[in-house]
Amino acid sequence: MPEFSSTTVTSTDVRTYPIRFGGYRAEVVSRGAALRMLERDGVALTETWPAQDQPPLSAGLVLAPWPNRIRDGHFVFDGVEHHLAITEPERHNALHGLVRRDEWQLVEHTASAVEQTIRVGLHKGWPYPLQVSVRHELGPDGLVVTHTATNIGAMPAPFGLGMHAYLRVGDVPLDDCTLTLTAGTRLPLDPARLLPAGNSQSVYGTEFDFTTPRSLAGVQLDDPFSSIVPDPDGRARHVLRAPDGTGTVLWTDRRFGWIQVYTADPAVEGYPGRGRALAIEPMTCPPDAFNSGIDQLVLEPNQTWSGSWGLGAL
């Protein structure tokens, strides 16, 4: 199918793909296949930034072939030891995979959808070629994001995927909002390195219990949650809601068994901090899954994995 004619190119060669459906409007960019903005009827549902700039705190980016962190960049798979490049030197971790800063290639762009793809080639400590694609599509209920990954190599490959989604309800301050998470357990992290520091624990009756709406006033989170319970339609829903009842819903299908929730550090330069945005990040596995083995995916040669999540307005 031919490309949609409204594709634009910025001065730094970051391509921008606008899409629309009904009252929804979004923009996706080529660098990191990032969701740069999503709004309905002019009300922002996600964090935004200038297309030519780096996304603040990796907002909107696809994280593959692993999300989050790998301790010391080291893991063993199929009896082979691997040493990845350290991309978070202050914590000595390999962070967020290999594709978030790269240019993705356009597959299709229509009025309401854009699909991009990238080949994950050979990198330091990563001998597993993969083809990874993402499709952003708007419909009557908002945005549907579908990820696929195919092992194009000759041997089994470990795999995980995540997405840095930063939710807003317009410009409503985060401290005025409530949060509801369909998640029953939380994985504790070492605060110094943000790596697992124990087994998953029940959230019920604790400060991490958001199974019913709770105010975010003064709440600080940077935590992975699991035991996600879907609705009868197979989608699990997490809601950021403003005082007037409007809100933004992030849903995930059963392929995403984890979410990381992060209240951004207001001290980070160039980011509005906890003024208005909350990261609710769909993930297939927790931090350091290539070492713990928890929900680590394995793709056999020629095998394809696919999973979906989405965003909409209440």
Image (tube, grey):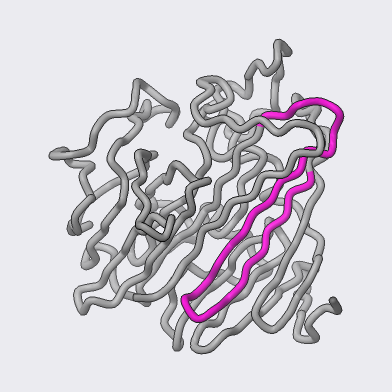
Q: Main secondary structure of the magenta part?
A: strand
Can you say whether 224 is above or below 309 in the image? Answer: above
Q: Where is residue 112 in the image (x, y as percent from the top left)?
A: 65, 80
Q: In the orientation shown, which residue stands out farthest toward the front?
A: 232
Q: Position of residue 236 (x, y in %)?
A: 39, 55
Residue at image position (37%, 52%) is 230
Q: Where is residue 168 in the image (x, y as percent from the top left)?
A: 39, 68
Can you say whether 199 is above or below 224 in the image? Answer: above
Determine the image quadrant of residue 113: bottom right
| Residues shaded magenta | 131-158
Q: Where is residue 155 in the image (x, y as percent from the top left)?
A: 81, 25
- 155 sits to left or right of 238: right
- 58 sits to left or right of 29: left
- 147 sits to left or right of 37: right
Can you say whether 43 is above or below 126 in the image? Answer: below
Residue at image position (53%, 41%) is 284
Looking at the image, which is closer to me, 294 or 25?
Answer: 294
Determine the image quadrant of residue 204: top left
Residue at image position (37%, 69%) is 248
- 209 sits to left or right of 72: left
Q: In the orientation shown, which residue stands out farthest toward the left?
A: 205
**Residue 149 is inside the magenta segment:** yes
Q: In which quarter of the image is the N terminus?
A: bottom right
Q: In which quarter of the image is the C terminus?
A: bottom left
